[in-house]
Amino acid sequence: MIKIENITKKFGSQIILNNINLNIQDSQKLLIMGQNGAGKSTLMKVILGEIICDNGSISIDGIDPIKDRKNALKYLSFVPQTPPPLRLSVSDLCHYCVSSTKANLNDIISYLKELDLEYKKEYKKPFYKLSGGMKQKVLIALALARESKTIMFDEPTANLDPKAREKFMDILNSKFQSHTLIFISHRVSEVKGIVNRIVEMDLGNIIKDNKANNE
């Protein structure tokens, strides 16, 4: 369970998160919506322990991601909206993931194949030289292979073609029903068959918190 209590974050005089309270239950499928600047990505970074807030607290299964980030991140995987410019080869990146987490290389390769990316054809290429769609597929495969209890996605299908988007959703529906999934996405139609809760943010506030129609 992720428990967020009275989180406030300011940058200068601008309030980015305004007294946010949010509990995310195990196995929940949550969509966070809102316009640019609503605070969605900042909230993700707070959960990941990347940002220290001015007020409030957060715990992931009782662990504070600021005070004990290493242990908190054992429960989390994250797919960012913008792939980092990593100079590692695809192979090195995959092996680093395997060595630092519980991921299995065969699982990574299998997820890549399901997303129509052949590891044997691409493994020697530097990650930063891949196309946007290929980078996204690699990051998705790495996150899924970790088998983390909670997986967070920031616009995960933005760089994928329609076929890959469909396959990505099929993987989540077939293999990750017991996981907690948190999405930031403007493509509501793509995730509406998965999510069972929708939170809408605006200017750092939660303005709606509804159960989705499929629950």
Image: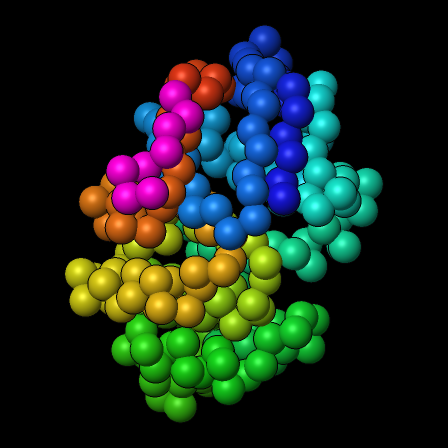
Residue 179 % position (x, y): 51, 58
Image quarter of the C terminus: top left
Q: Nearer the viewer, residue 149 or 83?
A: 149
Q: Is residue 20 above or below residue 199?
A: above
Scheme of image coloration:
rainbow
Q: Residue furthest right?
A: 67
Q: Residue at x 71, y 46 (%)?
A: 61
Q: Residue at x 41, y 17 (%)?
A: 207
Quadrant hosting residue 161: bottom left
Q: Residue furthest left?
A: 162
Quadrant hosting residue 43: top right
Q: Nearer the viewer, residue 138 or 206?
A: 206
* Residue 135 can be seen, yes or no: no
Left or right of residue 180: residue 49: right
Q: Residue at x 67, y 70 (%)?
A: 101
Q: Is residue 170 above or below residue 65?
A: below
* Residue 210 can be seen, yes or no: yes
Residue 158 % position (x, y): 29, 51
Q: Residue furthest bottom?
A: 120
Residue 123 % position (x, y): 45, 84
Q: How many marks?
A: 0
Q: Is residue 204 above or below residue 108?
A: above
Is-magenta flag for residue 214?
A: yes
Q: Residue at x 59, y 9 (%)?
A: 13
Image quarter of the N terminus: top right
Left or right of residue 144: residue 102: right
Is-magenta flag for residue 103?
A: no
Q: Nearer the viewer, residue 126 or 149?
A: 149
Quadrant hosting residue 55: top right
Which contiguous range is marked in magenta? 208-215
Residue 117 % position (x, y): 32, 78
